[in-house]
Amino acid sequence: MKLLSILCMGVLFSLPLQANELLTELAPNATTATSSDPLTTLLDRQAALPAVEKKATDEYLQPAPLADIPTGAFGDKVRLGYQLFVNTQQLRNKYVGNELNCVNCHMNAGIKANASPLWAAYFAYPAYRKKNDKVNSFQERIQGCFSYSMNGKAPVSGAPELVAISAYSYWLGMSGLMAQYNVAGTVPELSDLELVKGAKRDDFPMPKGISDHLDIAALSQLPGRGFPKTPQPELAYSPVSRYDCVQSALSSVSW
Ligand code: HEC
């Protein structure tokens, strides 16, 4: 009993000491402990991400007002695309598995610049995507957002929903381009088959009033796809020939 109480006292007395030791051990790391504090590391308190400053000369395409969407079968497709885009919940359980609408991420009905606007996207496809390692048509890119962003099931290729969202995207982009280049009239109608492809293809029916203004030389400066062919440089990269380089590299290797 005596031995036990002595042991107990020993434990009691040594506890504060141990705690103190622990504190001194932890002290140098105290700042790390604070920075991982959940109160200060919540997502909305993270440091601002670097933003590209907008230049005074920067301009964005201005699609026509939605009230200009024409009456008739083609206009109805464009309107349906808009309605599906802003209220995607009408496809809940059929194609949509969460509470989102496309417009939650692609803001202002897919018109807001710098929020992946549809008018820009339509003219950027077909394009290669690393995610599925192939060239994606415009409808394939939309299918991707149904599967992943909407946590749902993508409509099959050619489905009326994909045609409609493509028609809406095309109408936004083409109406903007026509305004930019003073091309009068209504947006030319495209077939469903044409609509779902996207506009970044050689056989896209670009109205002449617009294509006349497009600078093919400037296109060749875009990364990724170069046309026309860039001329050969006048000088080689280095006065030392490739053969000499290989020879000197080999001679420094000890075999
Ligand atoms: C949770 C957010 C979110 C939702 C909801 C969402 N998207 Fe997206 N979407 C993205 C992101 C992020 C990208 C990739 C943007 C990039 O590559 O710059 C993207 C890309 C796209 C692109 C290609 C844009 C481009 O410029 O390459 C299209 C088209 C698109 N989404 C359509 C849709 C449609 C249609 C819906 C609704 C069915 C939808 N998205 C819902 C986040 C979302």
Image (cartoon, helix red, strand yellow):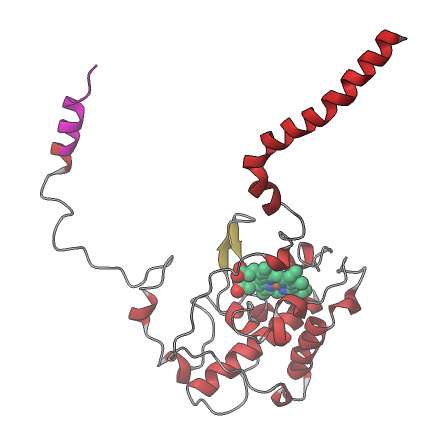
Q: Residue furthest right?
A: 1
Q: Residue at x 20, y 59 (%)?
A: 231
Magenta segment includes 248:
yes
134 vs 148, left or right, is: left
Residue 101: tell me if it is visible. yes
State the extent of the magenta-drawn residues as a range: 245-255
Quick one: 235 or 25, which is closer to the camera? Answer: 25
Question: Which quarter of the rendering shows the N terminus?
Answer: top right
Q: Residue furthest left?
A: 239
Q: Position of residue 6 (x, y in %)?
A: 82, 12
Q: Position of residue 102 (x, y in %)?
A: 67, 67
Q: Position of residue 78 (x, y in %)?
A: 65, 79
Q: Please tell me in which quadrant of the rendered image residue 42 appears.
A: bottom right
150 vs 57, left or right, is: right
Q: Residue at x 10, y 39 (%)?
A: 240
Question: Which quarter of the rendering shows the C terminus?
Answer: top left
Residue 140: tell me if it is visible. no
Q: Residue at x 51, y 79 (%)?
A: 174
